[in-house]
Image (spheres, helix red, strand yellow):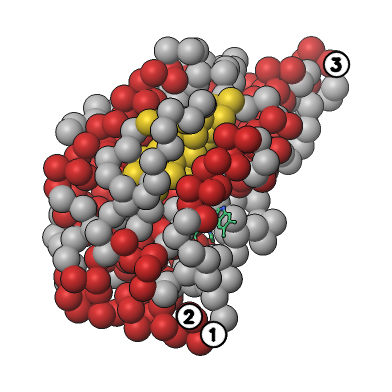
């Protein structure tokens, strides 16, 4: 698949910067809100951007590696949490509802038959990936299917008038996939890429490192993005990656959540580096590895609330900040309109 992502045009940059600089505040005093306002204006090619029909997509899938003792929780939690999302009881439900963000829950490859459960988007590639302990997690065909499906789902959401979309995930074992993707792409030592996930103790963390090291010895480091994603990824990560690429292609704001969503974004940036210009990194997760991954991407996350949940919760916490960036640009007086003396 090819993603036709336009690098941001600089045409409105001067007038946007002028509009930001002539608001009634000391030059630069709104800090990161100013950077955001500029980015959003450039994405939408206007000095009066708008956020419309915000969505949050939660991609859920299971991982073969989850049965090898890399998570503090058992695999069935993935499908149980999917049912919890649909019943409105998870953290992401509370926060998405609080900020009027439409939630879409996608079965990308959960190891469970949901039998026409209402409200679930069925995009199942398979009943979980294979374990990547001795061979790739998925076939190349499955990887491409997941990427394409993610892309299609975003295209559908765009038809509702949505121009801002957050990405979250659910999948027991997926911090392991994310760590492997991070290590293989960035070259940062594996140890630095692995964290406690759902809450492993030091013994569990040591075991996770040993298991992931042996997977690395077995499979090595594939040399292109498709093979890396197929070898160590998950269906939710691959589908999210395709969705992020399509969202950037459609000039939507791409809200990136925590460690796992950032690993999906890392792969998206490998496929097309221009995706980065459409991304807003919502928070720094407490999962070890996320800080270094953000640094690798030269990303400046909006929040650090010591959260380590995933589901897209970081996106929902950052959303009001993104709204504030748009609102100051549209609603604040300028020195001239307010009759305030400029320096
Ligand atoms: C009840 C529960 C709800 C969650 N919501 C997100 N995650 C998070 O934890 C998982 C990753 O951690 P690991 O790699 O250690 O399994 C993912 O499902 C992620 O979204 C949850 C985990 C649990 C247990
Ligand atoms: O940052 C995340 O996305 C994360 C961290 C730990 C567990 N689940 C998700």
Residue at 49 percent of width and 13 percent of height: 161
Q: Secondary structure at mark 2?
A: helix
Q: For residue 23, which quarter of the picture?
A: top right
Q: What residue is disc 1 on?
A: 202
Q: Quadrant of the N terminus?
A: top left
Query: Does the residue at mark 1 contact the one at mark 2 (Cβ under 8 Å)?
Result: yes
> Within 10 Å of the Cα at label 1, are there few (<14), some (14-19), or many (20+) other Cα atoms?
few
Residue at 21 percent of width and 45 percent of height: 143
Q: What residue is disc 3 on?
A: 339
> Within 10 Å of the Cα at label 3, are there few (<14), some (14-19), or many (20+) other Cα atoms?
few
Q: Using the rendered image of the protein, determine whether residue 237 is visible from the camera's viewpoint.
A: no
Q: In screen coordinates, is 246 left or right of 116? A: left
Foreground of the two, 44 or 202: 202
Q: Secondary structure at mark 3?
A: loop
Above or below residue 41? Residue 33 is below
Task: Measure how far apart labels 1 and 2 are at the Cα level.
Answer: 5 Å
Q: Using the rendered image of the protein, determine whether residue 48 is visible from the camera's viewpoint.
A: yes
Residue at 42 percent of width and 12 percent of height: 159
Q: For residue 87, which quarter of the picture?
A: top right
Residue 188 in the image: x percent, y percent? 35, 72
Q: Earlier in the sequence, mark 3 or mark 2?
A: 2
Q: Earlier in the sequence, mark 1 or mark 3?
A: 1
Q: Nearer the viewer, mark 3 or mark 2?
A: 2
Above or below residue 309? Residue 74 is below
Q: In screen coordinates, is 316 left or right of 170? A: right
Q: What residue is disc 2 on?
A: 205
> Within 10 Å of the Cα at label 2, are there few (<14), some (14-19), or many (20+) other Cα atoms?
many
């Amino acid at each position: 698949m090819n993603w036709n992502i336009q690098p941001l045009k600089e045409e409105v940059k001067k007038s946007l910067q002028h509009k930001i600089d002539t608001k009634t505040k000391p030059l630069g005093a709104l800090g990161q809100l100013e950077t955001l306002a500029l980015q959003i204006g450039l994405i939408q090619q206007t000095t009066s951007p708008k956020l419309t029909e915000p969505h949050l997509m939660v991609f859920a899938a299971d991982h073969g590696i989850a049965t090898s003792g890399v998570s503090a929780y058992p695999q069935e939690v993935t499908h149980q949490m999917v049912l919890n999302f649909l019943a409105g009881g998870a953290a992401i439900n509370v926060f998405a509802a609080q900020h009027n963000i439409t939630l879409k829950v996608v079965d990308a490859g959960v190891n469970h038959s949901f039998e026409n459960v209402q409200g679930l988007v069925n995009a199942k590639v398979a009943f979980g990936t294979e374990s990547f302990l001795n061979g790739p997690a998925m076939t190349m065909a499955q990887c491409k299917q997941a990427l394409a499906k993610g892309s299609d789902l975003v295209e559908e959401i765009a038809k509702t008038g949505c121009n801002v979309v957050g990405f979250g995930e659910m999948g027991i074992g997926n911090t392991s996939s994310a760590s492997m993707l991070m290590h293989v792409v960035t070259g940062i030592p594996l140890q630095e890429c692995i964290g406690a996930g759902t809450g492993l103790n030091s013994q569990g963390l040591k075991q996770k490192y040993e298991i992931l090291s042996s997977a690395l010895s077995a499979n090595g480091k594939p040399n292109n993005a498709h093979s890396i994603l197929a070898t160590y990824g998950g269906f939710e990560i691959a589908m999210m990656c395709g969705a992020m690429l399509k969202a950037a292609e459609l000039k939507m704001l791409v809200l990136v959540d925590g460690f796992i969503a950032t690993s999906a974004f890392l792969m998206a940036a490998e496929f097309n580096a221009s995706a980065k210009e459409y991304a807003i990194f919502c928070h720094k997760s407490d999962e070890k590895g996320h800080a270094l991954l953000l640094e690798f991407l030269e990303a400046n996350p909006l929040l650090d609330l010591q959260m380590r949940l995933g589901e897209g919760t970081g996106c929902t916490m950052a959303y009001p900040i993104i709204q504030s960036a748009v609102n100051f640009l549209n609603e604040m007086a300028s020195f001239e309109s307010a009759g305030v003396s400029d320096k």
